[in-house]
Amino acid sequence: MPAASLTELFDFETQIESALVTALAAVGVTAYKQRDDSAKSVPFVNVQFVQGESLGSLFTHQTVKREDRFNGEIIVEIATKRGAASDSHPAYRAKVRTLFSNWQGTINAGLTNLILLDCVTSGATPEIRADDHHDVSTLRYRTPFAIRYDAWPN
């Protein structure tokens, strides 16, 4: 199904972050997009998508050649209450990693205009935020992606 407009189609961040939040909710993880400003209670996950450089592929849409494949990075920040046995930080990390191990069936399933071409772990960083009493792990995934051929607006 085509996107309603080029503006909608090229809003990569909203599309991918929304698919991530939905996929994480399906496995029992409370997740927020990067621009969500609602009050968050631990445990929670922040998701952010960052578009990278073009992969040099062009698609002709209405006589105009437009880039249609890009590199990207998904950043997942997991926050749990420090020292709270009920907020299992390792369990949250494992849920996120399990979801990403099946990215084709979970994240891509929630995307209508885009498709992730690959999803590769690029590292994890642990952190203690003493002021917030949070344990935090930041997981990063490299993910080239493309605009689906049937998503270009008419």
Image: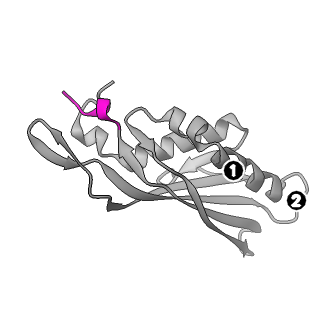
Label 1: state its secondary structure: helix
Q: Does the residue at mark 1 contact the one at mark 2 (Cβ under 8 Å)?
A: no
Q: Name the image quarter holding residue 139.
A: bottom right
Answer left or right for 80 relative to 61. right
- Magenta stretch: residue 153 in it? yes
The residue at 56%/39% (across/down) is 104
Q: Which residue is mark 2?
A: 84
Camera-side residue: 4 or 108? 108
From the top left corner, tell me how far across and down residue 151 is, in percent.
31, 32
The three-letter code of the residue at mark 2 reads Ala
From the top left corner, tell me how far across and down residue 60 is, in percent.
16, 41
Q: Residue furthest right?
A: 85
Color encoding of the figure? one colour
Camera-side residue: 125 or 43? 125
Camera-side residue: 64 or 95? 64
- Magenta stretch: residue 21 in it? no
Answer left or right for 145 relative to 58. right
Query: Which numbered circle lies on residue 144?
Result: none
Mark 1 vs mark 2, CA separation in Å: 19 Å
From the top left corner, tell me how far across and down residue 94 is, in percent.
77, 52
The residue at 91%/56% (across/down) is 85
Q: Which residue is mark 1?
A: 96
The three-letter code of the residue at mark 1 reads Val
Instruction: Please tell me which of labels 1 and 2 falls first in the chain.
Output: 2
Bounds of the magenta segment:
148-154
